[in-house]
Amino acid sequence: MTTLLLLLLSNVFMTFAWYGHLKFGHDWPLWQAILVSWGIALFEYCLAVPANRLGYGAFTGFQLKIMQEVITLAIFMVFAVLFLKEKLAWNYLVAFAFLGGAAFFAFAFKAPS
């Protein structure tokens, strides 16, 4: 549960670090957008690294990465609709469903030792 919570929080920071400047940073020089993004990303790393350390063993490295990607896309979907004011099209939902299927297969079956 701690791993999941830390990954959720880290991905909120990551999404704002990578994409937040798209809404407000157009007047900024690129170097400034990079520095602000790196400043935000520092908090992401401070959450993601412990999440992976704590989760490894209970989850495989593959499972941690797949979990992180599904969380990233779920958070980004909310971010894109609410913050960037983009439309959520059917093809994005289908793509997300396929990724959900990938996550199912990663967690539903015991990986060989």
Image (cartoon, grey):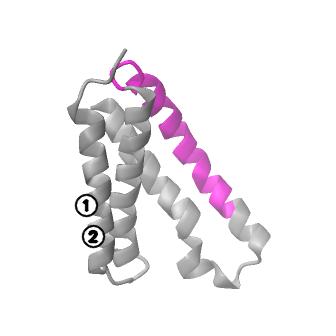
Residue depicted at x 53% and y 46%: 44
Q: Residue furthest left?
A: 108
Residue depicted at x 31% and y 62%: 96
Q: Amino acid at mark 2?
A: Leu
Q: Magenta segment range? A: 36-59
Q: Using the rendered view, name the quadrant where residue 85 is placed.
A: bottom left
Q: Is 44 left, or right, of 113 in this rendering?
A: right
Q: Using the rendered view, name the quadrant where residue 99 is placed.
A: bottom left
Residue labelled with disc 1: 97
Q: Amino acid at mark 1?
A: Ala
Q: Residues within 10 Å of mark 1 (few under 14, many from 20)?
A: few
Instruction: Classify mark 1: helix, strand or loop.
Output: helix
- Numbered circle sitting on residue 93: 2
Q: Quadrant of the C terminus?
A: top left
Q: Is residue 4 above or below residue 44?
A: above
- Label 2 close to label 1 by CB (< 8 Å): yes
Q: Is residue 77 above or below residue 11?
A: below
Q: Residues within 10 Å of mark 2 (few under 14, many from 20)?
A: few
Q: Quadrant of the N terminus?
A: top left
Q: Position of residue 71 (x, y in %)?
A: 35, 51
Q: CA distance from mark 2 to mark 1?
A: 6 Å
Instruction: Classify mark 2: helix, strand or loop.
Output: helix
Q: Is residue 38 above or below residue 10?
A: below
